[in-house]
Image (spheres, helix red, strand yellow):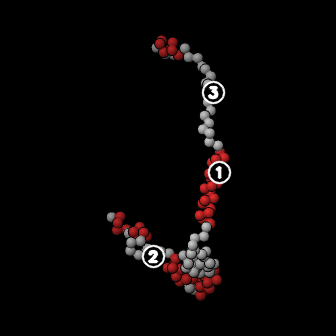
Amino acid sequence: MSDDPELEAFLKQFRPRRPAPLQSPPSSGVRPWRFVAVAAGLLALVLVFILEPRPGARPPRSGESTSGVPLPTVAVLGAALRAGRYEAVLDQTNARLLPNPLRPGSALSELGDINRDR
């Protein structure tokens, strides 16, 4: 094995022992039902704030976006497609709904400024 007699004597003293059983962690007194109660209360508060109508706010009508801009219906888009004006109708809707990236000072303008990368 080894040429070191002290190491040999030390290793011969080794006796395998069974490890002690693991101790369970002490109970902190917190019950799972408390977590359920707190979660249910928070869920109720969130639902109240989400479902509560805001003063002066009305739900969007059919065919209207949340910003109040009328959206083209399927019938309008179908008629525009048959008349060859489909892209013009989409461009008009785009101009009304999407932010203008060329407006000075807008976030889209700042993000699209390639001169800042130099």
Where, by quadrant of the figure, is residue 87 drawn? bottom right
Say above or below: 105 vs 19: below
Type of the residue with mark 2: Asn
| Residue 17 location (% of width, % of height) | 61, 20
Gap in Å between the C-alphas at discs 1 and 3? Answer: 35 Å
Task: Give the residue at mark 3.
Answer: 21
Task: Give the residue at mark 1.
Answer: 37
Task: Give the residue at mark 2.
Answer: 100
Residue at 65 percent of width and 45 percent of height? 32
Residue most extreme to the right: 33
Q: Residues within 10 Å of mark 2 (few under 14, many from 20)?
A: some
Residue at 59 percent of width and 81 percent of height? 72
Between discs 1 and 3, the one toward the N terminus: 3
Say above or below: 70 vs 46: below
Gap in Å between the C-alphas at discs 2 and 3? Answer: 69 Å
Q: Is residue 108 left or right of residue 19?
A: left
Type of the residue with mark 1: Ala
Between discs 1 and 2, the one toward the N terminus: 1
Q: Nearer the viewer, residue 81 or 63?
A: 63
Nearer the camera: disc 1 or disc 3: 1
Residue 112 in sight: no
Say above or below: 104 vs 7: below
